[in-house]
Amino acid sequence: MDEFTKLYLARRPSLAKLVRRILRFHPPEEIEDVLQDLWLKGSRAYAARPVPFFKAWIDRAAINLSLNRIRRFKHEPQPEKIRQDRLPRQLIDRDPRPDDLVMNRDLRKAIADVVKRAPKLIETVRLLYLEGHSCAEVAAILDITEGTVKSNAHKAVARLRESLTAPEAA
């Protein structure tokens, strides 16, 4: 077994989680396709030139292939959406509480506003806190300095906190 295969197999469970999170609305076969493409393309690239930060490099490649899959998926014909009248009665909450609807809508809107205003900051937070990468790995993935990673993380958390705790403008 070559060096790339050993490294890849050690990272495969984490890569599968990463790809699954990105392609969460896609069929499970798409996840396996991305992982197979990652292994094929990664083994060729690694054979040509081994990389010093394998974890960061392979994670970035998985993200890029997943995003490419999403872009390609947008242009393919989509199956018919599931209609609510075809779902079993137990799965449909016919009487949601109005305050829950308002709170959920406001929370989603606040987070969406922050994400729209600062996608680089949110990407840093996602890699650092949700993916569990170190500052050095996030810096390598995003091609920025470690200081910028720390600064972006601080700014993103502050913006999220501010948008979630700010009093509503009447």
Image (cartoon, grey):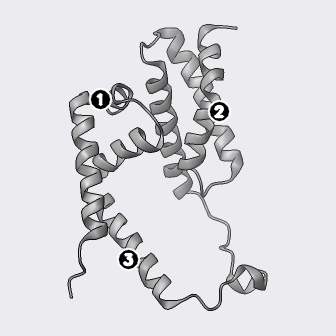
What quarter of the picture does the C terminus occupy? bottom left
Question: Sequence order check: which comes first, mark 3 or mark 1?
Answer: 3
First in sequence: mark 1 or mark 2?
2
Q: Which residue is mark 1?
A: 143
For disc 3, the neighbor class at 10 Å (few under 14, some 14 to 19, many from 20) is some
- Residue 83 locus on image (x, y percent): 68, 81
**Among the 4 quarters of the image, the one containing residue 147:** top left
Instruction: Describe the element under mark 2 as helix, strand or loop.
Output: helix
Q: Is residue 83 above or below residue 5?
A: below
- Report if the CB atoms under discs 3 and 1 are less than 8 Å apart: no
Q: Which residue is mark 2?
A: 13
SS at circle 3: helix
Residue count near mark 2 (Cα–Cα under 10 Å), binned few <14, some 14–19, many ≥20: few
**Amino acid type, label 2:** Pro
Distance of label 1 from label 2 (alpha carbons)? 24 Å
Question: Hey, which residue is sitting farthest right in the picture?
Answer: 88
Mark 2 and mark 3 residues within 8 Å of each other at the beta carbon: no
Question: Residue visible at 29% across and 44% down?
Answer: 153
**Mark 3 — residue?**
106
